[in-house]
Image: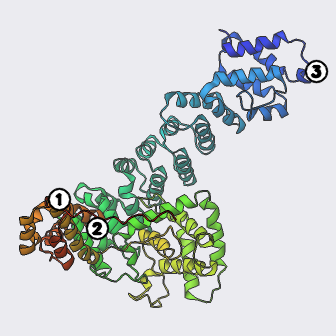
Amino acid sequence: MTFPAKIQAALDLYDEKQPLPAREYASVEALKVIKRLPESDQNDLYKIYQFFMNNLPRELEEEYVGMITEEGNRTPRLPAVDQVYKAIMEELGPIAYGVQSLYQFNHLTEETFNILFNIVNRRKTSATADEIAFAINFIGSRHELTPEVIDLIATSSNLCSLQNAVERLCDNEITITPEIANALKVHDDIECKARALVNLKRFTLLTVHNINMLAQHPIRSYQHPIHILTDTRLLTQENLNQLFAIEHAFLLSETAQDIFWSRIPEHVLTQDVFNQLLQLAQQANPGQLIRHYFNELLRINEDTTTIGLNDRQSTHTASVHRSVSESAKKLSNRYQSKKPEEIIPEIKTYINSLPKDSLKNQAAKNCIERITAPGYNFIDPVSQVSIKQLLAFAYLATEDQENCTAAAEDAKALFIEGLYEIQRGYNLSETGVDQGSITDRPICLAGTFNKIIEKLQSIHPDCQVSFITKKTLSLKLPIVVREEAMHYLSAKADKALTAEVQADGIEVIWDKIKEKVSARIFEEFGSLFQNQIDPEFLSTINSGQYVALNNTLTTFFAAPRLNSREPQAEPTVAPRTGQN
């Protein structure tokens, strides 16, 4: 066996240049060591690289670790040594920079070299060799590189999230067993899965059965339920079994997340309430039943037309969630160069420096400690922005004098007011008056996320909150019906049909325009209903056939149509009077 061709050529060049200049002579020990490798090791790239680096002078070792191999990017200092190193890097190919990273962090062993080589060559991940090597460095320093862990590194679509997940598990003394590795592997959001596993351990529920049960469901289906059951200390084996039972499947649906789990305040969920949910989930129309039950539980009037921002539940108008998600994405894009984890301590310092002379300030202090705690988290499913990230972006927005329309002091006051309303949302009356209870009664996860955006909507261009209710739907429906009627009749250009509609109403052409009316209304107001065949939605749409013709529409019908067969008058054009 011989050295790879490029390395052999570089070594031959070194032999031809003997004797070397004095300045290079002290550095050729690395070359001599390689040349003395047994023939059986001369094709072992790990040993060639390791032996070369270990026998360089200290200053050259540090330089070569970060050396760029492309021509023209470095002025050669020691040509013979440079050529051999460059040849080694070229032979390493796609794993070259990964090997450099492993060596730099003192984690290059034959095992890690082979792990890196196998992962890159298996091509199960889009990560670069350098990113993979960093993951091996980090995870290897916290956890044994077992076959299960190696497979996670090899298949993960987000190595940063994997590293955070492993760190969380290790901090909670959770060993990554084959079952846990499989549970982490089958879902993209590995960090959320790790948090769920930590919660199971808190209640001594981290069993193989429960781990496998979680692995069979997407994380978004049970992230909020387990979080809430944990915080309310209702996470028992019996409740867990009931939550995942097939007859209660609705409780793990996206609809259930939206109408209940992401909205339920901790102080409201009791064992009796959970038992009631289990019963309702088994009924024929669980979504509507649970929505009504939840609204009754919180004494919310579903059809309220009030959109005042002091209303503690204004953040749960159905369409708010979509507009808030869009706002969160805009803030994330604008301030993406900032690291939220560096901003949060600054926010806490600012809030904790507030005077203790008011209930509002004290509530803001309680709130910031609660929602920045390690175990508290909510990730908006649409924007993929977490509450902690949004908190940082919102704080940056209050200091952004180029885009924020309010003075810094006023913007900060709104930020504090938001924290206060988050922390004491259920201490406030319907008109926003604090009822003075000593115990804080915070709003829910989704409400917290929405409230942060709500407070910025009047002062920052990225923040817009849309309040869509069934009342606004009832106002919009006649407009859409008349527009579609005009479009249909204009395209038909049928005088007799137009006259019949004028005489008998839109009901005459309802079957022709109903589908388009339904599609337009559901696109804008769909979040108010379960789906497009929701009986309540169908009933609302069907009422559109009785929409009365208004004066504008009557005038439209009476006017001559440009696409009719009757000749139209030629347009007159004013003569040009010259150039300005």
- Residue at screen point 47% across, 65% down: 327
Q: Residues within 10 Å of mark 2 (few under 14, many from 20)?
A: some
User: Disc 3 marks which residue?
Assistant: 22
User: Disc 2 marks which residue?
Assistant: 525
Residue 372 appears anywhere in the view = no
255 vs 548, left or right, is: right
Hey, what amino acid is under mark 3?
A: Ala
Above-or-below relation of 317 to 239:
below
Q: Quadrant of residue 22?
A: top right
Q: Which mark is residue 491?
A: 1
Mark 3 or mark 1: whose residue is earlier in sequence: 3
Closer to the camera: disc 3 or disc 2?
A: 2
Q: What percent of the width, then of the height, locates residue 480?
A: 23, 69
Q: What percent of the width, then of the height, locates residue 114?
A: 59, 27
Q: Are discs 1 and 2 less than 8 Å apart at CB?
A: no
Q: Quadrant of residue 8?
A: top right
87 vs 114, left or right, is: right
What's the CA distance linking mark 3 and mark 1? 92 Å
Mark 3 or mark 2: whose residue is earlier in sequence: 3
